[in-house]
Amino acid sequence: MIRLLALALIGLLAACDQNMSDQSKYDQYEPAPLLKEGRALEEPVPGTVARDSVDYERAKAEKPLLSAALLARGRKEFDVFCSPCHSRLGDGNGMIVQRGMPRPPSFHIDRLRSADDQHFFDVISNGYGVMYSYAARVPAEDRWAIIAYIRALQLSQNGRLDDVPPAERARLLAENPQ
């Protein structure tokens, strides 16, 4: 009797194998009274931009004018998102690299100094090599600010005295005679 009862119990348990697809769920367009908006398909969060949307393409093409405020924002965003790998100097020796992760290229190599700004925008947006996409983390306006700051880093590490305006050059030479 006990064996028969155990066998029946095992048979019942084996019959309870429901698939996830057998669950009741809402179709995306049908009313859903249990959800906040009363429908299963909710509106996107304000400010959400789909990657392939017209707004994204417009933001990609709308490079802001260079200003001190843009550079300051670029430095702030660079320090948060880029410096862990690229370092604050942009030489590719950030803290993550010092802990064993692959080293990214320095922003000061000829290939990246001669790369156009769109290249940097695309890399930040889509990722490159082991770097993943930052499109969901960094808005397009901040990507342009980061690019402006990268250009400032490149100038700071690769500038020549001839690049300095004459009045400033005279002041620098007077302060640092050779």
Image (cartoon, rainbow, N blue to C red):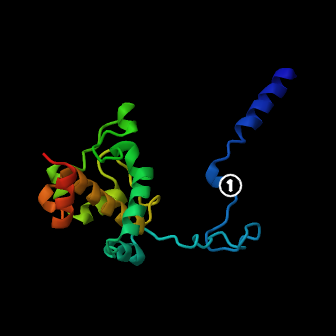
**Quadrant into which the N terminus falls:** top right
The location of residue 163, given as percent across then percent down, is 15, 61
Q: Is 153 on the left or on the right of 110, as rendered? A: right
Residue 164 figure quarter: bottom left
Is residue 82 shown above or below 29?
A: above
Residue at image coords 73%, 69%: 36
Q: Does 64 sit above or below residue 108?
A: below
Tell which of 173 and 41 is nearer to you. 173
Q: Secondary structure at mark 1?
A: loop
Relative to 138, residue 12 above or below:
above
Using the rendered image of the protein, determine whether residue 152 is visible from the camera's viewpoint.
yes
48 sits to left or right of 104? right
State the quadrant of the C terminus: top left
| Residue 121 spot, x, y in % from top left | 31, 63
Q: Say which residue label 1 marks.
A: 23
Residue 18 x, y percent position in the rendering: 67, 46
| Residue 34 falls in image quadrant | bottom right
Residue at 14 percent of width and 55 percent of height: 160
**Residue nearest the viewer, comparing 39 with 118:** 118
The residue lying toward the viewer, choosing from 171 and 66, is: 171
Along the line of sight, which residue is nearer the eye, 13 or 77? 77
Residue 49 locus on image (x, y percent): 47, 71
Residue sitting at x 25%, y 64%: 117
User: In the shown orientation, is residue 77 left or right of residue 115?
Assistant: right
Please state which amino acid type lies under the numbered disc 1: Gln
